[in-house]
Image: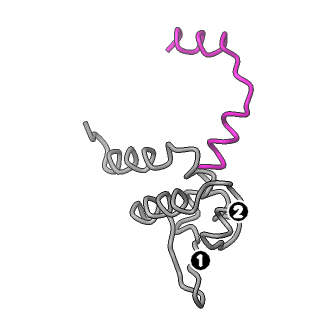
Amino acid sequence: MDTEPGLTAAAELFKVLGNASRLALLRIIGDESPTVGSLVEATGMSQPLVSQHLRTLRQAGLVIATRSGKEICYRVADLHVTHVIADAIAHVHEPVDHDDTIDHVAHD
């Protein structure tokens, strides 16, 4: 049902983004170029869990790992992703008028 080119790939992207821990990591990484250790400290997640999420984010092409001496730093691969996350967070903070939504759907 990929009626528009890119819909399937976009759905896969949303699957990766559909995890609160990965979103938290991307928010932190979007603001700086942290190491695994600083991500563990910032999130309170275990090092193995942070590493697992980072692997998923790397495989999805959302973060890039670069070596800095003995440490590896992470950065967001594409700022579009940080905008998508920021927009999603802004959206969930917007007040919802359920009556308006029902009226809008009924008139369409």
Residue under the image location 60 percent in, 9 percent down: 103
Residue closest to the far left: 1
Asked which secondary structure carries label 1, the reply is: strand
Q: Quadrant of residue 72?
A: bottom right
Residue closest to the far bottom: 69
Q: Position of residue 96 (x, y in %)?
A: 70, 22
Q: Which mark is residue 52?
A: none
Residue 62 included in the magenta stretch of the image:
no
The residue under label 2 is 41
- In the rendered image, the vertical position of residue 46 relative to residue 35, given as above or below: above
For the stretch drawn in magenta, the main secondary structure is helix
Total marks placed: 2
Asked which secondary structure carries label 2, the reply is: helix
Left or right relative to 53: residue 93? right
Structural distance between the alpha carbons of marks 1 and 2: 14 Å
Q: Position of residue 108 (x, y in %)?
A: 49, 15
Residue 91 included in the magenta stretch of the image:
yes
Q: Give the quadrant of the N terminus.
A: top left
The residue under label 1 is 73
Magenta span covers which residues? Answer: 85-108
Earlier-in-chain disc, 1 versus 2? 2
Callout 1 amino acid:
Cys
Residue under the image location 57 percent in, 67 percent down: 76
